[in-house]
Amino acid sequence: MSDETPLVKMRGVKLEGRSDETWNLIINGVDLTLARGEVLGLIGESGAGKSTLGLAAMGYTRDGVRISEGTVEFDGIDLLTASAATKRELLGKRIAYVAQSAAASFNPAHKLMDQHVEGPVQHGVMGRGESEADGIELYRKLRLPNPEEIGFRYPHQVSGGQLQRAMTAMAMSCRPDLIIFDEPTTALDVTTQIEVLASIRDIVEQFNTAAIYITHDLAVVAQMADRIKVLLKGDEVETADTRTMLAAPTQDYTKSLWAVRSFERPRKPDVITGSTPVVSVQNVDAAYGKVPVLYDVSFDMHAGRTVAVVGESGSGKSTTARCITGLLPPTAGQIMLDGEVLPPDYRKRSKDQLRQVQMIYQMADTALNPRMSIGQIIARPVQFYLGLTGGAKRKRVDALLEQIELEPTEYYNRLPSELSGGQKQRIGIARALAAEPKFIICDEVTSALDQLVAEGILRLLAKLQDDLSLTYMFITHDLATVKAISDEVVVMKDGRVVEQGPKDDMFKPPHHAYTDLLLSSVPEMDPDWLTNLLAERGVDNIGDAAVDKM
Amino acid sequence: MIIWILATLVGMGALAWGFRFAGQAATGNAPKFRDMPFGVAYGYVLGAVVLLWLGWAYLQGRSADPLVANKFFFLRIAIEGFIIFAIAAWLFRILGRSVGTAWTKKMFRSMPLTASFGILTILIYAILAIFAPAIAPYGQEQIIPGVAANITPGGDPALGGSPDFPLGTDQIGRDILSRLIYGAQNTVGIAFATTLLAFLLGGTFGFLAATLGGWLDQVLSRLVDVLMAIPSLIFALLLMTIASVWAPELGIPLTVFMVLIIAVIDSTRVYRLARAVGQNIVVMDYIEAAKLRGEGLGYLVFKEILPNATAPLLAEFGLRFCFVFLTIAALSFLGVGIQPPLADWGTMVRDLGGFVNYAQFAPMAATAPLLAAGAIALLTVAVNFVVDWMLHKSSGLKE
């Protein structure tokens, strides 16, 4: 493979970022070699420096970041000392970049094709007409629907998965030697993700393009990469061929990453028939304005159990939660709490009814008031619901902080911005617990977190459930999380409940066709998984295409 | 003439090219010069030319020939003022860095010179305004007997000034320095009160509209649209004319009406900002959590929304203060604002404005109206510098 000069050669690269008026080390001397046509997977937790290193491979740094040491060579050209003119020749033409959020990276004011042809025309690779024809060809290769016509739409007129593929086409427009993919599928649903993965893999192979694939999802990287490099806090942990790495990781950290998905709760005894569920959703219809979003949704949640509600974005999971909390009064049906009908609007509910139903949010950043200290945030429900003040309040808050495994004296006076993502999520849990509720809605609580941190949160939630006999409604799109924590599963699609039942039944065939599709779309660690799946189902029977057929 | 201008531009272009080439040669093709666009090189040359011209003009201003010196008098004062203020701001920043609590020291360390100048100026104005009766040598209404109008500042008898009155006396024999100091109290004080009132009104209604939404939001927003559709100065002038009839009948000072009128007009702008900022905060999950907890409106607005809106509101307060202040000065200049015999900068500019015509041959005499105008300008600039700095800080931008 590496018989000639490598395409990218980074040696001892140190990157520094500026914060609080000093330069802090982000990447601590990493080497990276990439041969032509090779795909390198770059994995690590958030803050490990994957994206920064990926950008540095282009000789580029974000504002407030600098390359303090080391060399970056692209095809023998030293990118760090190259003139602006030389770099202009390379970037976009021979090196391309695909960002995480295609929706945020496309200019909403221009059509896709206009943005597609900009690179080739500017670099003088092709004329406009030629480039447009080539764009249509690329769209076809990436299996976008209506390739002739889709380029003349605006970014908001196509779906997220399609946009991500259009962006890949744009990166391909000059036939670059290197593409850097920065978490291209992280924001997508599993069924959409698989489609994008298959397209990207195909086209990279077809044009023999080298790629750096940045992600935190091991199963994804296993499908895409020839080699994997693991980063931890700016240091390289290990690098190996994908198969070697998956089969026999040598470092402890890598092993722990591999082992995350092993957490699974023991099966609970079956619900006693005839017992009153803590919360019961009965024939609920709901609408935003005149647009109906939920149709006849019914399911029960029993004491001390976790009900996972699964489905893709737009399937009505969060809307169901909004109906239960009373933020969106249903247009038909009712919500029962302990066998009593809850008023549909939260403003009409009693303080005690409000106290019983608590919520933990997906984004801990927006769920905690940034101007309040941790102590104030947790103390408020303690004072509001339980009427505790002074020393008693402080004692209760300290006890709650201990329950979520944070040292009270250390964290009481901190602001949310001084905590890590996982710690913030723990504060969200403590705030919900402070109300001493029976029932907690967990809305995608782990999807914004790294896998190791997410596992810690799941274990904490499981422990709290055992100690306090809480009932959880666990909204998620991640089936690994479902497997880990749930007792019962409700599958939703387009505002309807498709299938529901105990977890063990759900993960065993026979499934409803949609459940089957969801389950089969979750990437597995086996590097042949995508190839096998494509062979089994055919390219037209995965992702959105398959969903549409139902 | 045109040929000369063109020749200068082309000459500067050649200089810019030469500058870049020399830079490349001298530094061994360092990236700074290698990647320098021609426009940037031209900018450097242009800046150098302007600086050179200013230096030349300053020397002209210090020329012994009064005809030449008079021509460049104001430029000379401006340059001297600029340097003095810059040094004062620099010294003030050094003082701030070495005295005070750890928090203020940290603040001064990251402060640009413009902001330290702004804070210093605002501090001086505040001290003058608060302690005006103690600082001013004469009363603001006091007509000093036996003193003729003598508007020459400087107090140098050789130049026609009077040592007893450092900034001279106005047409009816009042000390200009005292009136300037009292003017700080009147103009700035009233502007501050007006801005506070405008924020109380606009902020309260803005947050209410953002939190409650629905018909209240519609009614308030359309009302504000209507008020904003009328040009504010003309609207204020119109209302002030009506108020000047009512004021004596009701026995309420006209100043009270002025404060109310300007506050209501300016509160529309505050309303829009508070509503927009509030709407961004209201959609946050922590607000939803508080609502679901069953919190009341008061808690939501004061504990959850307000603390998160302080940065933009504070910045707006600074800007709004400038606008209110200028509106008051403008109204006073037009004769409907702060009424004589109260000292006020706007009125002072109007009363002494005629002397500006002497600028050509007796620049010292022409400074009299410019002192009050300069006081207005200085405070406006100072407040804007501080606001810029605060906005920059709250936006979290780096460099």
Image (cartoon, rainbow, N blue to C red):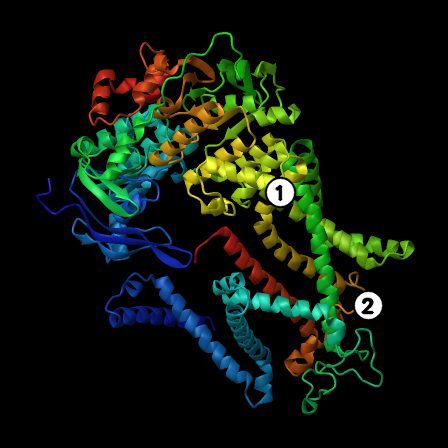
User: Is residue A460 visible from the viewing direction of this image?
Assistant: yes
Instruction: Look at the numbered disc 1 and give the secondary structure of its residue.
Output: helix
Dividing the image into 4 quarters, which one contains the C terminus of chain A?
A: top left
Callout 1: few (<14), some (14-19), or many (20+) C-alpha neighbours within 10 Å? few
Rendering coords of residue A161 (x, y %) = 35, 29
Mark 1, chain letter?
A
A233 displayed left or right of B91: left
Q: Mark 2 is on which residue type?
A: Pro
Q: Mark 1 is on which residue type?
A: Gly
Share a chain, discs 1 and 2?
A: no
Residue labelled with disc 1: A390
Q: In this view, does B92 lie above or below B233?
A: below
Tell me the CA gap for discs 1 and 2. Answer: 57 Å
Q: Nearer the viewer, mark 1 or mark 2?
A: 1
Dividing the image into 4 quarters, which one contains the N terminus of chain A?
A: top left
Q: Quadrant of residue B78?
A: bottom right
Mark 2, chain letter?
B
Rendering coords of residue A297 (x, y %) = 50, 14
Query: How many numbered marks does the figure carry?
Result: 2
Rendering coords of residue B123 (x, y %) = 63, 67
Residue labelled with disc 2: B340
Callout 2: few (<14), some (14-19), or many (20+) C-alpha neighbours within 10 Å? few
User: In percent of the image, x 42 and y 27: which residue is there?
Assistant: A462
User: In percent of the image, x 47 and y 40: which residue is there?
Assistant: A365
User: In percent of the image, x 62 and y 23: which residue is there?
Assistant: A345
User: Is residue A346 visible from the viewing direction of this image?
Assistant: no
Residue, far left: A3
In contact (CB < 8 Å): disc 1 and disc 2? no
Instruction: Look at the numbered disc 2 and give the secondary structure of its residue.
Output: loop
